[in-house]
Image (spheres, rainbow, N blue to C red):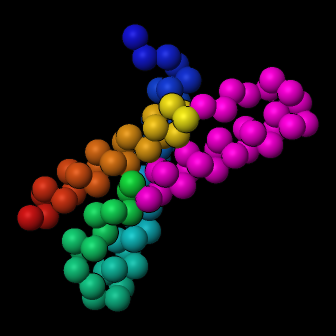
Amino acid sequence: MIPADKLLHAAAGTAAALFALLFTGVALYAASLPMLAAFPAPTVGAVIAGLVKERADWMDNKVHPGMHGVEVWDIVATTAPGLGLSMLLWFLMQ
């Protein structure tokens, strides 16, 4: 069974990936560039969200020790939906 914490990270990663894709898609459309250039955006958005969240947890732990767990697997759980969306876009746009 997947821990609830990891599912919340996956949900946040999905939201970040969709936001990054939407923002990039609008920018590419406005610049009349091919949409295929948007395929890495979900992964990049999810990775950034995961890194920022774990950095914030690390900083919280400096003020309130033990308040948050800081784990690499949290970053992986946040990034996974973005990577999946990027791969889906790549295959659909071929």
Indicate the quadrant where residue 33 lies: bottom left
Q: The N terminus is located in which quarter? A: top left
Indicate the quadrant where residue 50 lies: top right
Task: Residue 81: say if magenta.
Answer: no
Residue shown at 54% from the left, 55% from the top:
48
Residue shown at 44% from the left, 68% from the top:
23
Residue 78 in the figure: left or right of residue 56? left
Point out residue 17 in the picture as x, y percentages from the top left corner. Answer: 42, 52
Residue most extreme to the right: 63
Mainly helix, strand or loop, the magenta region? helix
Residue 32 in the figure: left or right of residue 58? left
Point out residue 75 in the picture as x, y percentages from the top left corner. Answer: 52, 40
Point out residue 39 in the picture as x, y percentages from the top left corner. Answer: 28, 63
Whether residue 19 is visible here, answered yes or no, is no
Give the number of marks.
Answer: 0
Against 19, is 28 above or below? below
Against 30, is 24 above or below? above
Residue most extreme to the bottom: 31
Residue most extreme to the front: 72
Against 32, is 65 above or below? above
Residue 18 in the figure: left or right of residue 5? left
Residue shown at 20% from the left, 51% from the top:
88
Residue most extreme to the top: 1
Against 75, is 20 above or below? below
Residue shown at 9% from the left, 64% from the top:
94
Whether residue 78 is visible here, answered yes or no, is yes
Task: Residue 68: say if magenta.
Answer: yes
- Part of the protein shown in magenta: 44-71
